[in-house]
Amino acid sequence: MVDLAFVIAGSEATGGAGIQVDLKTFQQMGVYGVGALTCIVAFDPGNGWAHRFHPVEPGIIAEQIEAALAAHEPPVVKIGMLGTPSTIEVVEKALAGQAFRHVVVDPVLICKGQEPGAALDTDTALRERILPLATVVTPNNFETRTLAGVDSLDTVADLEEAGRLILKSGPSAVIVKGGVDFPGPDAIDVLVQRLDGGAVDVRVFSVPKIGEERVSGAGCTFAAAITAGLAKGWSVPDAVATAKKHVTEGIMARVSARTPFTTVWQGAFGPDQ
């Protein structure tokens, strides 16, 4: 039987982020990917590769979700960039109406192509309407500080405490990604997971940093790999450990282009790893 995973996310035409990365990651891990598009982000190469943000009409998003879930019964879903409060409302209804075993939320906050006021409304709606429905949340350094309401993340203890604060929003697990902004030579992620009975388990995942520059698609690949692992029936810690390995290898084999950034190469890992 083929393992299935659903993704609701935006498109990024250069192939370095968004639903393009999600589906490539699913495929590399031997999982059949189904997707619904929420928005289109088109970089502007004539303007310093600035973001051009184009939301998909909410009714069309609802139709995509309806068709995908009528055709398949994926046990897990990954939520990527949503982009507008109206999109979040559509996705909230879809999540409430489907018994997913896991809902993995990569909480994309404030797209650079959005007006500040609209972006703030979207961030607020995401926190209030989507995070409580999540089982796993994968915020980066900036998203963690925003969601947890903390000023800085300087130690592993800071990462853990921020994860515990976000856990209060409703998810069963939070994977706080220190990223290149975290001090020191290592790329450190901290998993804070609520266990049956209410106890909280904390695990630290650490590998040496590969340079100090951001690589596009790392966060998308990480969350998608976790989603694929959960689709295969793995535990959250096992899915996180494999995702960490995959992202590390993808960064080492990163793809260069005529852009000011490089991108993760999902082909660096395979389904048997």
Image (cartoon, grey):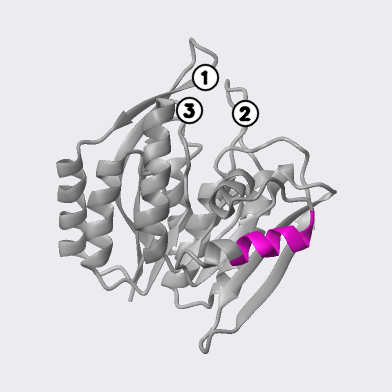
Amino acid type shown at disc 2: Phe
Numbered range of the magenta stretch: 155-164
**Residue 238 counted in the magenta span:** no
Q: Position of residue 14 (x, y in %)?
A: 46, 30
Q: Is residue 81 above or below residue 40?
A: below
Q: Position of residue 209 (x, y in %)?
A: 78, 48
Q: Is residue 153 above or below residue 95?
A: above
**Badge 2 is on which residue?**
261
Asked if marks 2 and 1 touch (Cβ < 8 Å), the reply is yes
Q: Residue at x 72, y 50 (%)?
A: 153
Question: Residue 204: which numbered mark, if any?
Answer: none
Q: Which residue is mark 3?
A: 112
The three-letter amino acid code for the residue at tag 1 is Trp
Amino acid, disc 3: Lys
Q: Quadrant of the N terminus?
A: bottom left
- Residue tagged by mark 1? 49
Q: Which residue sits at x=41%, y=34%?
A: 119
Q: Residues within 10 Å of mark 3 (few under 14, many from 20)?
A: few
Looking at the image, residue 134 sits to the left or right of residue 229; the answer is left
